[in-house]
Image (cartoon, rainbow, N blue to C red):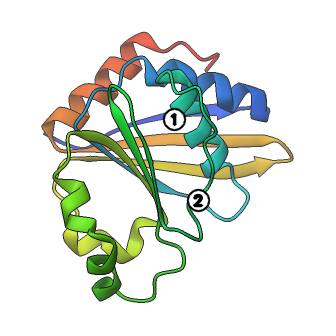
Amino acid sequence: MDELELSFISNSPVESQQLAEEIANYLTAPLLILCAGDLGTGKTLFTKSLAAGLGYQGKVSSPTFNLVQEYQGSPELIHMDLYRLQSEAELATIGFEDYLNRNAIILIEWPEIAFNLIPADFIYLKLEKLAVGQRKISFQAEGESCQNLVERLKNNVNFGN
């Protein structure tokens, strides 16, 4: 299978929230989402909205300083932020590979340092700033199960594009 990509244009933070909440309806564990984008493009906002769409009622915060936040539920959501890590060896200190083996939805911000440890089945989520408040939100699928997921999103999520 060739890689599959799907993109949306969001014209406001509210639209980005709505998109994430809608997409959450199609997510099942286990799932790995690698989230990329410059500072301030809305990665954490998207994650908070995804968590809300999955039914989490509590506070969802950026794991920038503690690296990992876990949100219990069905499915469990694990949110990582690897921005502060300097080397792949540091991933062992947070039990990175153990997390990858959990039956959870795992969303990793700043995943570049972990690329050598990432399994072949994942969603690459990229947020790009186009203008003030406007974002391009792209989903690129690697691996058969994630390609099937992006195909379902393509066929079912109607987001004004």
Give the side of residue 6 with respect to residue 10, left or right.
left
Residue type for callout 2: Gly
Report the residue at 56% width, 60% height from top: 63
Note whether 36 is above or below 58 in the view shown.
Answer: below
- Name, please, the residue furthest toward the right: 132
Total label count?
Answer: 2
Q: Which residue is mark 1?
A: 7
Label 1 crowd (10 A; few <14 / some 14-19 / many >=20): some
Give the side of residue 117 with respect to residue 11, left or right.
left
> Residue 149 appears at what percent x and percent y?
28, 27
Looking at the rendered image, the disc whose residue lies closer to the viewer, 2 or 1, is 2
> Residue 34 appears at what percent x and percent y?
40, 54
Report the residue at 31% width, 84% height from top: 88
Give the side of residue 42 with respect to residue 89, left or right.
right
Report the residue at 19% width, 61% height from top: 98
Residue type for callout 1: Ser
Give the number of the disc on residue 37: 2
Callout 1 secondary element:
strand
Q: Nearer the viewer, residue 132 or 62?
A: 62
> Residue 160 appears at what percent x and percent y?
64, 16
If you read the primary sequence from the N terminus, does the residue marked by circle 2 or circle 1 appear first?
1
